[in-house]
Amino acid sequence: MWTGDHNPSKGTQNPEIEIVGNDPPSAGNSGPMNKRKSAHFNIPETVTKDDEAYVEITLDVRDDSVAVHSVKTEDPEISFLAKGLEKRASLGSTVIHNASSRIKQVSQELKRLASITTRRPPQGRFDRTKSAASHALKSLKFIVDGNEGWSAVEGRFDNLTSSTNGLLPRSLFGECIGMNKESKEFAVELFDALGRRRGITGDSINKTELKEFWDQIADQSFDSRLQTFFDMVDKDADGRITEEEVKEIIALSASANKLSTIQKQADEYAALIMEELDPDNCGYVLIENLEMLLLQAPSHSVRGDSKILSQMISQKLKPTKRNLIVRFFRGLNYFFVDNWKRIWVIALWVGVMAGLFAWKFIQYKNRAAYDVMGYCVSMAKGGAETLKLNMALILMPVCRNTITWVRNKTGLGVVVPFDDNLNFHKVIAVGIVIGVGIHGIYHLACDFPRLISASSDTYEPMIQYFGKQPTTYWHFVKSFEGISGIIMIVLMAIAFTLATPWFRRSKIKLPKPLNKLTGFNAFWYTHHLFIIVYGLLIAHGIQLYLSKEWYKKTTWMYLAIPVTLYACERLIRVLRSSIKPAKIQKVTVYPGNVLALHMSKPQGFKYKSGQCMFVNCAAVSPFEWHPFSITSAPNEDHLSVHIRTLGDWTRQLKTVFSQVCQPPPNGKSGLLRADYMQGENNPNFPKVLIDGPYGTPTQDYKKYDVVLLVGLGIGATPLISVVKDIMSNIKAGHEEEEKSLENGSGSGRRSSNNFKTKRAYFYWVTREQGSFDWFKGIMNEVAEMDNEGVIEMHNYCTSVYEEGDARSALITMLQSLNHAKNGVDVVSGTRVKCHFAKPNWRNVYKRIAVNHTNSRIGVFYCGIPALTKELRQLALDFSRKTSTKFDFHKENF
């Protein structure tokens, strides 16, 4: 007999352990010192009622380890909870010397497990041993990071109570335990529930009481968390939850997750939960019913992966330790492979600039001016030559019609990074700044002082260029060359400064009236100062000091073709928009400050999914044109754009269109609409001009068999057009197959429809529930018609706490119940189930890599720049270390 040690401090006696036999070695555990020991643990009488209950543990004893082989008990719930003991790893050699103490610990743990099941579960209680419940058992977490520990909570308590005599107010409880400010109401309800359990009725607690609260909410056991959540709902502490209490907790959860629609429908959803949990119409539900609902709620499922392949990919993606030199060259190789298009274009540009600079430097080194001004004149003229080139080149990346035509009609996209046109525009702008700096500094700080201080004999060869020798700086400043140069520098400085993200995106807050210098309007108008700059630049180049022959004044030669091309582009925009007017058919103002414009498609307006067009509204500004992604599909008979109010121009546009819209009769949808219909009461829409279409990275999605579409907020607009286009092509292909079979002209294969994309993954991440109204129709259409699973839709609402958080637990229940009953998601209002919080992008890539080995995936992202780096890096990592290649394309706004 082995008897456990008695611990007086516990007040109880450890159960008795009895060896019941030695099993001989088996094939699975053969060895010279390998024995199997079985022991019975008698559960104390305080736990059992009828027969003497026991727990039998079988151990595998080897030379250097003791491992738990099996655990058997008459109580199925204890058996389930004790199964984790079987999964413990083999113990080290020190454990064999302390086997009796380890078995004692096992017995104590089993005793604790037995103590929480003193009563048998009621008939019908959900079986936790089912694998489907394993995910739900991790739910109902009340704190974001339980590992933060009591010490951090204690530190916040001391800071928050420094002026309250050591008492923590109820209103600061959430902040003290680590909940964010948005969950203040939820934290207050949690405080009340914990207080009711302990008979605390005041509005403040001391540190000892806070420690008790913390121990309960930090308890990782599901039963403890379930009881806490139940107590939050059960406000009268009678052990029963009524429909009114369910309604209150639904409203609270919806508020914590910023789900206004669910708040408004709390009555409907409370009735739905009661219908599920109280089928006998008792008027209340018990904790067992709530547990069953939690454990039965299915988690979001995705298509099955190969676990082995997934593990192999995970292993490959782990960083490996290599020699520093090897890592450097490997990284350098990756850099060249990933950026070779950009590299050769930049290298060509730098090479041409260096050649021009060197040519002009040597040319002036051999002229008489060099004897007076030295290398200063050569440096100034070399900088001027690069400046001419860059002032010509900077117009080319913004000639959108030309770029779109070249992109669509030629194969240059294979070697030229057209998607980087605006980045190249910015790089050239940096080159202009450098050229202006070299040219201006060497003239002002070197050339002119030397001319002023030169001796009469030395200056004599310069008389034919500068006239009588000047004695002051004013001689150069007051000349046309000096005045025009200064004006150009000032205008370019203004335009460059207000084009920076800090000013253009209003990241800098300036006091009135200087706040007019921030925003898109300031950037747009000041950028057009370059019309004056180009005029002055040509005149400045004609009035050169050191060149009198016309053919040596080359500034106009550099600018002639680019300026003419850009002028033609602007003329085409004006003519095309006026000749082919767009007639507004429907306007909708959605929650989330989004304006949707549906307009007629001008004759001959042909575009590809993912492309954009420019929009002008004279009622806002007769001169401004702004680009927006086209959200309609090419085969539709109308054009549509969805415009979010992110700046002053879009804000005014929404205002002028909202004035002609009317709310719906029932007043429940929160939308403002206006439709153009035949009759006398048609709304008087503001006039809108459009120009386009223009090419974007997204239009190239058809090159790939599989695409990953990622939209952040309003960035989903070009991707929605792609989704529509894929659906249209799928339907067209099916129709063609049917006709082919009917006519007996083929085997049903698609002949003329050579659409390449066969699989699409669409991920839309937004922080506002109302955003899903923007594209509700297309999401429902995909869910209903995509029987082959070509388009996999994933909606994410980041305002909702991740699955497992107690603040979103009830939303998860509602989502499962409502989708099962009505086929509609409670968050998105569509047939597509919504996920909570942010996606794990690494897992997204891994799943696609597992499902599409040896494939090339087109990744198309549209949204703010913040996510670009992560998605691009993951595409590179998976392309380098797996057989699946990811080509990343992005559009930022």
Image (tube, grey):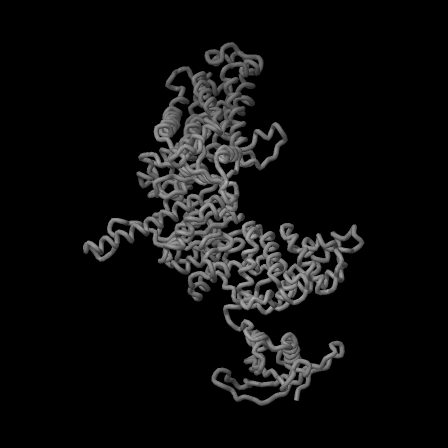
Above or below, comparing residue 119 to residue 324 in the picture:
below
Vertical comparison of 559 with 130: above or below: above
Q: Is residue 841 visible?
A: yes
Q: Position of residue 601 (x, y in %)?
A: 35, 36
Relative height, residue 538 to residue 234 (above, below): above
Query: Is 635 positioned to the left or the right of 420 in the image?
Result: left
Which quarter of the picture shows residue 878? bottom left
* Camera-nearest residue between 472 and 118: 118
Measured as percent of width and height from the top left, residue 614 is found at 42, 34
Q: Residue furthest right?
A: 165
Instruction: Between residue 547 and residue 831, name the one nearer to us.
Output: 831
In the shown orientation, is residue 741 left or right of residue 598?
left
Q: Of 437 and 264, which appears nearest the observer?
A: 264
Which quadrant does the N terminus fall into?
bottom right
Tell me the residue at 27%/49% (across/down): 753
Asked whether, in this view, residue 489 is left or right of residue 606, the answer is: right
Residue 276 lies, in percent from the top left, at 53, 64
Frontmost residue, 325 versus 528: 528
The answer to whether residue 355 of the structure is visible from this angle is no
Residue at left 57%, top 65%?
A: 138
Residue at the far top in the pictured view: 468
Residue at the far left: name it.
744
Q: Is residue 214 above or below residue 586?
A: below
Where is residue 715? Give x, y as percent: 47, 44
Count of labels in the image = 0
At x 63% / y 61%, what residue is drawn? Answer: 233
